[in-house]
Image: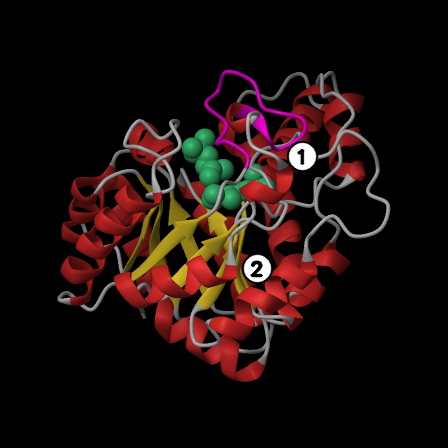
Amino acid sequence: PLVSLNQILDHAAEHGYGVPAFNVNNLEQVQAILQAADATRSPVILQASAGARKYAGELFLRQMIQGAVASYPHLPIVMHQDHGTSPAVCMSAISNGFSSVMMDGSLMSDGKTPASYEYNLEVTREVVKMAHSFGVSVEGELGCLGRLDTGMGEEEDGVGANRALTHAEMLTDPWQAKEFVLATGVDALAIAIGTSHGAYKFSSPPTGSVLDIDRIKEIHDVIPNTHLVMHGSSSVPQDLLQQVRDFGGELKPTWGVPIEEIQRAIRWGVRKINIDTDLRLAMTGAIRRHLIENPADFDPRQYLKPAIAAMAAVCHARYIDFGAAGQA
Ligand code: G3H
Ligand code: 13P
Ligand code: ZN
């Protein structure tokens, strides 16, 4: 059934596991996730960004996810709006049947300009008030993640548009997080602890810890009942990059967040782990490979089928690695 984010994350907190939240834009991605969730008996968080709504249309997304809910009635499924840029966007998602919304007030409504703390508090509080009256959960964000991929090229160091801030200044402050949660009533909080969006997270292989695990512990200590969310959590597996390159793709050297780091973060209170880039890499590699190896094929189903399988394999691995497998 369609459930709220709290229903899934409360269970995850109680049993100490993490739930991957996968971005969806089309039918094939929804199918890949549900195949993997069904095979592993995992709770499902499907999330749609502003870009997804622009690409597919809110109504199509809604109907597609409702198709998933009807096809897999035994699995709990959250339909979450990723990075809502304003209360109006969140309201529109709620009226279109989303069971959870993110109000990302860390940025202004252009989705790019860093916002003041006061602005963030104000818009998030407004969304919580509205969403809770419909039984819809709300994720807020505090701190500066690397900027969102605007399609204009991604940043290598996760500092991006906020280059003026030092790394330490970008991280979420635990006491401010406590104040923010108390003042807004959010159910889940996205925190900045060293991740950034997109494929180009780290320009050399990670040595030691890439996440600020101590910071996660500190935040979890002061707001133990708020579900922590980690954006930018793709691991950017080298074999997925290599497959894209082997079949004509051009990708610069890059590294993501190691799975073991995510597992440590889960041990200290991270419950929702956002993943998009790894899925894009898996699908693109499979499609490139199929078309090169089968130059006579022209039925989209011929190359979308291996793309679904490649994406499902990544989802399958994440469900197991984060401990969500067997929990639905
Ligand atoms: O948070 C960003 C997600 O990867 C979605 O990306 O805005 O290109 O759909 P998008
Ligand atoms: P990645 O780019 O690391 O997959 O992060 C996706 C994300 O955070 C969506 O909100
Ligand atoms: Zn994100």
Across and down, in percent, residue 233 comes to 61, 48
Above or below, 161 against 170 in this view is above
- Crowd class of label 1 (few under 14; some 14 to 19; many from 20; radius 10 Å): many
Marks 1 and 2, Cα distance to the nearest angstrom? 26 Å
| Residue ID at (26%, 40%) | 60
Above or below, 117 against 180 in this view is above
| Residue ID at (48%, 58%) | 34
Q: Which residues are magenta?
A: 146-160
Across and down, in percent, residue 123 comes to 22, 47
Give the labeled residue for mark 1. Answer: 201
Q: Is mark 1 within 8 Å of ligand 2?
A: yes
Q: SS class of the residue under badge 1?
A: loop
**In the image, is 67 to the left or to the right of 175?**
left
Q: Quadrant of residue 68?
A: bottom left
Which residue appears farthest toward the bottom when viewing the image? 14
- Closer to the chain start, of discs 1 and 2, is 2
Determine if residue 269 is in view.
yes
Give the labeled residue for mark 2. Answer: 36
- Crowd class of label 2 (few under 14; some 14 to 19; many from 20; radius 10 Å): many
Disc sitting over residue 226 in the figure: none
**In the image, is 7 to the left or to the right of 218?**
left
